[in-house]
Amino acid sequence: MDGYTVGQLAALSGISVRTLHHYDSIGLLKPHGRSAANHRVYSADDLQRLRHILFYRELEFGLGEIADMLAEPHARVDDHLRRQHRLLRQRQARTEELLDAIEKEMRARHMGVTLSPEAQLDIFNTDSFGERLREAEQRWAESNQNQELPRRTAAYTKDDWVAIKADADANIQAFVDAITAGEPATGAVAMQAAENHRAHIARWFFDCTHRQHRDVAAPLPRRPGGRRALERDGTRFAHYVHDAILANADRAG
């Protein structure tokens, strides 16, 4: 008889002869016929059915569920292929989401941020806070804060990060209020906001001298997009903060 022996089918499919015998015993994959020596012989249709079984098994369906799907009276080969394609795409999307979440958490933990992406989203309205902190570290690479930053942040709890966020928001609001009030960036009010910003960094991240604070301010005018949400009536928030920090550093000598 033309067809595949159980050994040949096992070799083609990568599963064991014992598994094929089991599929036969439960009626999931019955061989098309028998040889003259009463050995199982599988047809091309049997091979196609086995492909469907293995796809569904890979998608973690139970053998009973697979039997029910393959027994659907109007289901054709194309119907099964479309279903398997859809299910695999869904699993692929979910896998990519999980990989993305894990990678973000790995990057965050590398910076000493032990918050999960969900906690980062809850506190900072982004699940990529750890990545942003990493970018800040790279911008602040001069001097020794590189070692100090992850050492400090590694010890912070979620409550600490909530406090950090509250301090940062208050500092941002102080700059916004100064701009709204028409205070010059080189004036006392704006310089005090800049000094508070420096103290915030020194308290939570690294010992920020006035010289280092200049380094923090340096890229701000080149990165207006990061502050676009804070623009008010066309004011250049990033430039204002930059100028206030430099004026405060000059005042400190």
Image: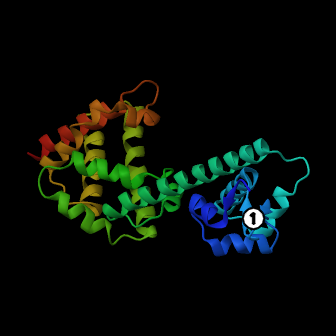
Q: Residue furthest right?
A: 73
Task: Give the side of residue 149 with respect to residue 115, left or right.
Answer: left
Q: At 27% from the left edge and 45% from the top edge, which residue is drawn?
A: 194
Q: Quadrant of residue 200?
A: bottom left
Mark 1 highlights which residue?
35
- Quadrant including the C terminus: top left
- Above or below, 105 relative to 85: below
Q: What residue type is labelled 1?
A: Ser
**Quick one: label 1, few (<14), some, or many (20+) residues within 10 Å?**
few
- Quadrant including the N terminus: bottom right
Q: Residue furthest left?
A: 253
Task: Give the side of residue 210 with respect to residue 16, left or right.
Answer: left
x, y percentage for residue 110? Answer: 31, 62
Q: Say if residue 123 shows up in the picture.
A: no
- Above or below, 125 relative to 115: above
Q: At 60% from the left edge and 71% from the top edge, which residue is drawn?
A: 16
Q: Say if residue 220 shows up in the picture.
A: yes
Task: Give the side of residue 204 with respect to residue 83, left or right.
Answer: left
Q: At 82% from the left edge and 69% from the top edge, which residue is drawn?
A: 27
Q: Is mark 1 on a helix, strand or loop?
A: loop
Q: Which of 223 and 112 is in front in this view?
A: 112
Task: Give the side of residue 123 with respect to residue 209, left or right.
Answer: right
- Above or below, 118 relative to 247: below
x, y percentage for residue 42? Answer: 72, 59
Q: At 64% from the left edge and 50% from the top edge, which residue is drawn?
A: 88
Q: Which of 77 and 107 is in front in this view?
A: 77
Q: Which of 24 and 38 is in front in this view?
A: 38
x, y percentage for residue 2? Answer: 71, 53
Q: Nearer the viewer, residue 212 or 154?
A: 154
